[in-house]
Amino acid sequence: MQADGAATQLTPHAASAEGRRAHLHRTRPGLSRLVGVVSTLLVLVGICVAVPQLVETISHAPPVADSLGTFDLPVHLPLAANLVAGIAAVAGSTERALRLRSNRLDTLAS
């Protein structure tokens, strides 16, 4: 923050992970966009896997089940698929953070 109260974006150090990601964005913008799209898709897939499972778990709690009923997933993923989806979502969120573009979606995914 500046003395007058205005906020400014800091520039990452060139040797840091954020600096290397910014360098990739400057030197290879097409590849940077592709990496950005893939990371966003990874985050969305992770959320699409995790949120229904969370809703199912919460719906089986006795107070919720008594008042709203239960929700059962039609398909249950194996543990390995859940782990892969979770790790992919965290990797996508990490990449988005390196671009200094993190938001609530990334927080929910990780």
Image: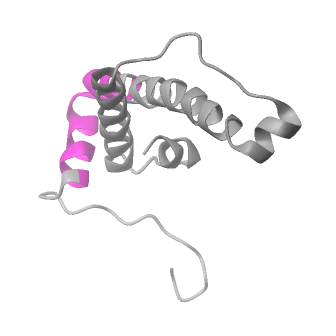
The colour scheme used to paint the residues is one colour
Which residue is more in the foreground, 86 or 61? 61
Residue 36 horizontal side relative to residue 21, left or right: right
The answer to which of 16 and 56 lies nearer the viewer is: 56
The residue sitting at 53% across, 24% down in the picture is 48
Which residue ends up furthest to the left in the rendered image?
15
Magenta: main secondary structure: helix
| Residue at image point 19% right, 52% down | 17
Q: Any magenta on residue 63?
A: no
Give the vertical position of 2 relative to 92 (above or below).
Answer: below
The image quadrant that residue 3 belongs to is bottom right
Q: Residue furthest right?
A: 67
Q: Position of residue 103 (x, y in %)?
A: 54, 48
| Residue 29 within the segment the image draws in magenta | yes
Foreground of the two, 28 or 20? 20
Where is residue 61 drawn, in percent x and y?
A: 68, 43
22 versus 31 height, above or below: below
Assign the C terminus to one quadrant of the image: top left
Q: Name the residue: 70% across, 24% down.
A: 71
Residue 33 image position (x, y, % from top left): 36, 25
Q: Where does the magenta region start and end?
A: 18-37
Q: Quadrant of residue 86?
A: top left
Q: How many marks?
A: 0
Measured as percent of width and height from the top left, residue 36 is found at: 37, 29
Of the pair 33 and 42, the residue shown nearer to us: 42
Farthest residue, direction bottom: 3
